[in-house]
């Protein structure tokens, strides 16, 4: 997994608390932290709190696309990313991206 975006109702009030929770991990933005060699966690303003989206890097985007098609999972291709239909995943926004390229979460 490359990144996780977490929806927060009051970003201004809660980002400091998240910073304390994620210490001593590197803060890479006003509301983003790199957790070791694992995923980046980014907070985003949202009407609902919880996991907002995830970005997964895959070795073979064409193979991932074929797998989604075989299973009848709706998705949209956006350049070198596959955006899985959130309705297929109980509202969760999941993107699959080509792992051979560098990606900026949320881009």
Image (cartoon, helix red, strand yellow):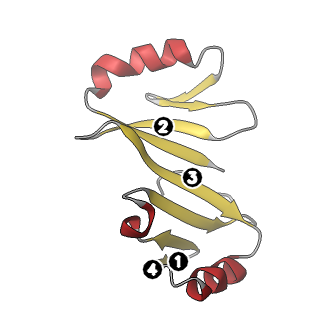
Compared with 74, 17 (above or below) is above
Q: Quadrant of residue 97?
A: bottom right
Mark 1: which secondary structure? loop
Which residue is rendered at x = 77% and y = 69% of the image? 59
Mark 2: which secondary structure? strand
Asked whether the beta carbons under mark 3 and mark 2 sit within 8 Å of each other, the answer is no
Give the Cα separation between the discs numbered 4 and 2: 26 Å
Location of mark 2 (residue):
42
Left or right? Give the position of 62 relative to 20. Answer: right
Location of mark 4 (residue):
74
User: Which of the two discs, 1 and 4, sits closer to the camera?
Assistant: 4
Give the Cα separation between the discs numbered 1 and 3: 14 Å
Location of mark 3 (residue):
104
Give the Cα separation between the discs numbered 4 and 3: 24 Å
User: Which of the two discs, 3 and 2, sits closer to the camera?
Assistant: 2
Which residue is rendered at x = 22% and y = 40% of the image? 47
Left or right? Give the position of 44 relative to 71. Answer: left
Left or right? Give the position of 57 relative to 76. Answer: right
Location of mark 1 (residue):
79
Q: Answer with mark 4 or mark 3, whichever residue precedes in sequence.
A: 4
- Rendering coords of residue 2 (x, y %): 64, 49
Mark 3: which secondary structure? loop
């Amino acid at each position: 997994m490359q990144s996780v975006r977490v929806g927060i109702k009051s970003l201004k009030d809660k980002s400091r608390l998240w910073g304390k929770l994620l210490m001593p991990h590197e803060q890479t933005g006003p509301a983003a932290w790199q957790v070791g060699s694992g995923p980046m966690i980014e907070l985003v303003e949202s009407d609902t709190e919880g996991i907002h989206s995830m970005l997964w890097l895959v070795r073979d985007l064409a193979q991932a696309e074929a797998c989604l098609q075989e299973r009848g999972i709706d998705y949209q291709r956006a350049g070198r990313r596959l955006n899985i239909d959130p309705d297929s995943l109980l509202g969760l926004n999941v993107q699959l991206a080509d792992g051979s390229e560098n990606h900026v979460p949320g881009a």
